Image (cartoon, rainbow, N blue to C red):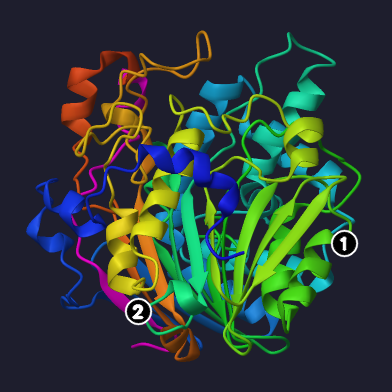
Amino acid sequence: MKKLLWLVAFALIFTGASCADKLAKQDLPESSSGKAVTQEKTDVRKYDKGYRFNENGWIYVHIEGEPYERGKQHGYLVADELGELMRVLKFVTYWDTGMEWDFWVKSAQDLWKDKIDEEFKQEMQGIADGATEAGTPMTYEDVLAWNGSGELTDYWWPTAEANVYAQQPVPDKDHCSAFIATGGATKDGQIVAGHNSWTDFSTGQYQNEILDIVPTNGHRIFMQSVPGLIDSTTDFFLTDAGLIGTETTIGGFTAYAANEEPEFYRARKAMQYSDNLDGFVKLMEKKNDGGMANSWLVGDINTNEIMRFEEGLKFQSVDKTKDGYYIGFNAPIDPKIRNLEASNTGYGDLRRHQGSRMVRLTELMDENYGQIDTEIGKEILADHYDVYLNEANNPSSRTVDGHYELDAREYMSQPGRPIPYQPHGTVDGKVVDSDMAADMSFWARFGNSSGLPFDAEKFLEEHIQWDYLDGYLIDRPTQPWTEFSAGEK
């Protein structure tokens, strides 16, 4: 599949300007430059074989060894951040669902106590013990619930709630923009991939961990993560097997099987124990519960092959190529998943973020076909072109770099949803190519893909409907792109 011919009809939106030309009109901050920027590493700490430091908005954490040992290193080194994150999580989860944290802890145990391998139970116990030793009291059960919190609230709870309480709309599960390209699509013929995370600011403001895991068994993993998690959750990762991976969640997905294994656990196993693309699919499909249904974009630098793996519950689809690209925009391509396991996905609807990015990402990939590298990748992730309004610089929910917080949402097709000026959107950007992946390194930018800052106090003053988040939102200033490598000190 050279250029996704199924999207030709949408190319009529194409305006003819180059990616660089359109981005030049956006008046981005000077630090949006792709040049390497470093600053002094701060808050350097060590614990056993693990260590951490802060740089340009990121927390870099290295852990290694047996499961409990590496878990304890992780928990100890991020205890301060984990304590603050849990304070926010407990408040926001209760506000959004009406259920106290203890309910989610018990539910996680009921669902998954017998479904997690001992290796990862030990790692999570280590996280709890390490955090506790460092002054942030936590239990294994807390860590389990935290790791599965997205699945609990967005997939299991809507099903369970319908049997007891008034049925609520399906939560917005769709997050992130992504692409992966190879062969003739890229400047040097190698794999290039990029991803940015779309999320609620209350929890997304803590998605600033760069985690380097050296396990005693399986492959080394270098990924973006969040303090206290054993997987990526934002799902941007490299492994020393030569895999590059990312994903975007499938919007409107409603299927769920509570008797199977959670996605965070399957994803971690797939990262650590997959030798190739087929191995990744096999481990993800095993005992799949439908949680966090994703369009996975994965590349193998050993073969220069890339894959789009769409995983529903009953239905999955796999496409591979060594010459072309795939994009992720939160709506499934596969007709079975889109029509039988999901509803109201936003596929093709330019008023919504799925359809608008479906078009815009295709435009950007086609405009830059044959020239895509990590610098072009950074520009793609920073793009603010609104294809619905045909405006070159309109950061909103419809742009690749998403900004719900700036959007009145007046064009939406869902009555009553979503809410205008929601504190939600892009909080980062990551890009990588095969050469970098071979060295276990990638580019990362925290705060926002384009560098637009977020001022929490100003936002709450202008949008008092969100004042309950006062004390739970923090500023995200403009940060530069920074290159990180596994084993960096």
The CA distance from mark 2 to mark 1 is 32 Å
Where's the N terminus, which quadrant?
Answer: bottom right
- Identify which residue is drawn at 71% across, 51% down: 141
Q: Which residue is mark 1?
A: 286
Rendered position, 370 above or below 356: below
Q: Earlier in the sequence, mark 2 or mark 1?
A: 1
Q: Is residue 139 left or right of residue 25?
A: right
Q: Is residue 367 left or right of residue 174?
A: left
Type of amino acid under label 2: Phe
Rendered location of residue 467, percent (x, y): 30, 19
Rendered location of residue 329, percent (x, y): 52, 45
Queried whether the magenta region covers residue 37, the answer comes back as no
Queried whether the magenta region covers residue 487, the answer comes back as yes
Asked if residue 435 can be seen in this view, the reply is yes
Asked if residue 226 can be seen in this view, the reply is no
- Dominant SS type (magenta): loop
Q: Is residue 170 left or right of residue 335?
A: left
* Frontmost residue, 350 versus 451: 350
Identify the element where label 2 is drawn: strand
- Identify which residue is drawn at 54% across, 32% down: 348
Q: Which residue is mark 2?
A: 484
**What range of the chain is rendered magenta?**
467-489
- Identify which residue is drawn at 33% across, 46% down: 401
Rendered location of residue 119, percent (x, y): 77, 74
Identify the element where label 1 is drawn: loop
Rendered location of residue 384, percent (x, y): 26, 43
Q: Quadrant of residue 407?
A: top left
Where's the C terminus, which quadrant?
Answer: bottom left
Type of amino acid under label 1: Lys
Rendered position, 113 above or below 222: above
- Identify which residue is drawn at 10% across, 54% down: 29
